[in-house]
Image (spheres, rainbow, N blue to C red):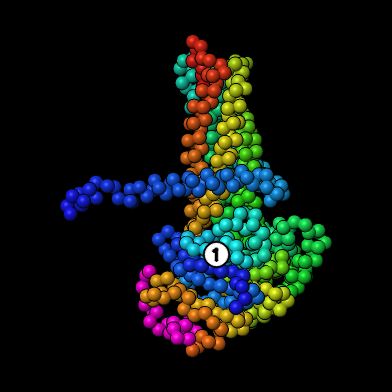
Amino acid sequence: MPAISAMENLVPSRSLFAPVADALVALGDWAAFSLRTLSGLTSRHFRRAELVTVCTSVGVNSLAVVAITGTFIGMVLAVQAYGQFRQIGNETSLGAAIHLSVIRELGPVLTAVMLAGRVGSAMAAQLGTMKVTEQLDALACLGVEPIRFLVAPRFVACLVMIPLLTVFADLMGMFGSSAICLKVFHIEPYHYWEHTRAFVHIWDVGVGLAKSVVFGGIVALVSCHRGFRASAGAEGVGRAATQAFVVSFVAILAADFVLGLFGNAVHDMIWPPTGLTRMA
Amino acid sequence: MNEPLIRLNQVAVRFGRQTVLAGLNLEIAPHQTVAVIGESGCGKTVLLKLLVGLLLPTEGDIAFEGKSLASMRENELTTMRRRFGFLFQQAALFDSLTVFDNVAFGLRAKGGWGRNQIAERVRDRLGEVGLPGGVEAKMPADLSGGMRKRVGLARALALDPDVMLYDEPTTGLDPIMTDVINELILKVRRRRPVTSVIVTHEMKTVQKVADRVVMLVPVGRVTEGGSQVVYDGPPAGMATADDSRVRQFLAGEAGDRLKETPD
């Protein structure tokens, strides 16, 4: 029947929709996984001892890499922006611009991305290995719900430690930028810090920290989910670790965009904009 | 036959487009020792995981003591699982815990056990599987394959299970260690009124410990109008089974299977 054949040609084949369908299924699975994790926070299977271990792994062991990253962010921003600010004769405002960028955007985002690579991939690999060696099944057989038992402490650790590391990265970024601006470009210190004080508000610090809390949750839930869904073999575990980083990275950037819009809307609701557009 | 402890009714399991089990009916009576045999990929391990609720069937129903696993709430499923002991193929010991903590894990998770009671139970179970006292502080990575299996068995026995599930308990072990594990399975059965399901390829294990054998074939090899279960009877009857595939498996002959055709 030629008419039906023609119609069949117009209907996209299943392969066109398959990636979308797979993505939706994975998203639904992740949402259910996240809900089980949240319910595990009040479970008696929540292990405080495990929380201390994971906090050490996520927080203390990440200090050096976060310090180096934060310092270089500040230094690179100072080097890149100095030329433009000098052209308009406004070098003393450089501190305000850099510190605002670091506190609101770069500090939270780059710290979260760094930890997605360092901590998230390791979580996915560890849980993925437990999956393929049937340790997750063994937990269930011993009457312990694996998601609540293993994921809840990792979720809390990321939720607490990533904002603390973000504060540390912010401070190191400010240290790096001020070292370059004040010692290399010889910007006058009083005005450098005075402009920072005038333009960086407690709201900006709050927005940066709120973002880092959300990013911490994303890194934990995405990475643990990938680990739990690892397929068999070394390749499956490796793929889970890679996916944990890639998905976390994309999710962090998407969340940053949404939170940025949301933050601005809330700010404008509390402090309605006047004639001057707020610098953000 | 007594009222079955476990009943599988028209159970099917599919992973994507691959069908692993189809229309499977099986009843296991209390205190029976059932060996489940069959070639690789016929769904033996999947069957074990179905029994303890680690996997859910795509179709059909599984009941434990007459109650459907699908109708159980999470806490009921957890309580039921604690009545099962599971010896995994590679033992599945928790890498980050010592031998002692591995064996004590289920007791601590269940709660209501004092420190001394846990220590006493752990030592008793390690003794039962023939492990010396000095092994308690070792990490799983420091153990040989046979010792890992013994620790896995001790952990599975810690909560005095009503049902023991063994997933290829002798795979990868030398003949002597294989016999040690077989003897331990018999010892476990003598010490307590346990129902056992043993998935294995090892015919010596079947002959030595099982009082019933269930042989499965992959879904792709089920004959027209037939079942995945091609043999269900005592070990001694396999040699004279009607189905040639049972005799072929018992003899371990390649026969027409030299050239594989994809499913």
**Residue A38 horizontal/vertical position (percent):** 61, 43
User: Is-magenta flag for residue B129?
Assistant: no
Q: Which residue is mark 1?
A: B62
**Residue B38 horizontal/vertical position (percent):** 49, 76
Left or right, residue A236 beside residue B222 = right
**Residue A3 horizontal/vertical position (percent):** 18, 49
Q: Is residue A103 above or below residue B190?
A: above
Q: Is residue A206 above or below residue B89?
A: above
Q: Residue at x 50, y 88 (%)?
A: B239
Q: Is residue A126 visible?
A: no
Which residue is outermost to the right?
Answer: B116
**Region in magenta:** B241-263
Q: Is residue A32 above or below residue A263?
A: below
The residue closer to the viewer here, A65 or B138, is B138
The chain to which mark 1 is attached is: B
User: Is-magenta flag for residue B247?
Assistant: yes
Which residue is outermost to the bottom?
Answer: B240
Counting other residues with Cα less than 10 Å from the Cα at mark 1, is it few (<14), some (14-19), or many (20 or more)? many
The residue closer to the viewer here, A60 or A157, is A157
To which quarter of the image does residue A168 belong? Answer: top right
The residue closer to the viewer here, A73 or B88, is B88
Q: Is residue B16 visible?
A: yes
Of helix, strand and loop, which one carries label 1? Answer: strand
To which quarter of the image does residue A66 belong? Answer: top right
Q: Residue at x 65, y 70 (%)?
A: B163
Q: Residue at x 39, y 80 (%)?
A: B258
Q: Residue at x 60, y 80 (%)?
A: B210
**Residue A94 horizontal/vertical position (percent):** 54, 21
To which quarter of the image does residue A72 belong? Answer: top right
The residue closer to the viewer here, B101 or B115, is B115
Please state which amino acid type lies under the numbered disc 1: Ile
Which quadrant would the N terminus of chain A be assigned to in this image? bottom left
